[in-house]
Amino acid sequence: METFTGTKYENKGIAQGAVARKPFLTKRGAALLIICTRSPRYNKKAMRQEMVYPKFVAYGQLAERAMADAVTGQEIRVEYHLETKRIVKPDGTIEYLEDKVITSMALGRTPTKKNVQVEEVQISNEQPNLIEQSAV
C-alpha cells in the first residue's frame, strides 16, 4: 500500500465573513453571493488588514435561501467545493473557469439599522410635592 507523505489538498473550503451585497440571480438561474473576508495581509499605509471579496455560486434550495434571507452586512459562513468548467470559443481557443459552489450555508447576526429615529423624551428635574397631594 502506498503512503502519502506530502500535503493533501481537497477540492473544498470554508469561508466566513459578511455579505458584501444582496445576492442576485444570474442568467443560468444561480444565485451569485459576494462575501467580504479579512485577508491575512496587513496594509501598512492604511494601518489595517486588507479585505478580500470572493464570489460564490449557489444552486437550487441554497440559491432560494440566499435570495430570501441574506442581507448586506450579515454574518455568513459557507462551505464550498471548486468546480472547473471548460469553454471552447468559436475561434477554437479553450478557456477554463473555476466556480466556488456553495454546499452549505449558515447565516448569523443581521446588521443593526443605523438610521432609526428615536423618540425624544423630556425629563423634568421637578419632583412632585407628596405632602400637598396627601393632604387633599
Image (cartoon, helix red, strand yellow):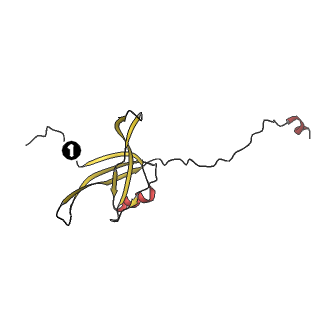
Q: Quadrant of residue 29?
A: bottom left
Q: Residue at the far front: name it.
A: 91
Q: Which residue is pictured at 40% across the width and 34% down the height?
A: 45
Residue 122 vs residue 98, the one in the foreground: 98
Q: Residue at the far right: name it.
A: 136
Q: Which residue is pictured at 43% across the width and 53% down the height?
A: 21
Q: How many marks?
A: 1
Element type where label 1 sits in the image: loop
Q: Residue at the far left: name it.
A: 1
Quadrant of the frame with the C terminus? top right
Up-down relation of residue 69 to residue 51 (above or below)? below
Up-down relation of residue 86 to residue 130 (above or below)? below
Left or right of residue 63: residue 114:
right
Amino acid type for the residue under numbered disc 1:
Tyr
Left or right of residue 21: residue 98:
left
Q: Where is residue 65 shown, x and y percent of the image? A: 41, 58
Q: Where is residue 101 shown, x and y percent of the image? A: 30, 55
Residue 1 vs residue 22, the one in the foreground: 22
Up-down relation of residue 115 to residue 49 (above or below)? below
Mark 1 burial class by Cα count in 10 Å: few <14, some 14-19, many 20+: few
Residue at image mark 1? 9
Quadrant of the frame with the N terminus? top left
Q: Quadrant of residue 6?
A: top left
Q: Which residue is pictured at 50% across the width and 47% down the height?
A: 111
Q: Which residue is pictured at 32% across the width and 54% down the height?
A: 102
Residue 41 vs residue 100, the one in the foreground: 41
Q: Where is residue 31 shown, x and y percent of the image? A: 37, 59
Q: Where is residue 82 shown, x and y percent of the image? A: 26, 52
Q: Quadrant of residue 88?
A: bottom left
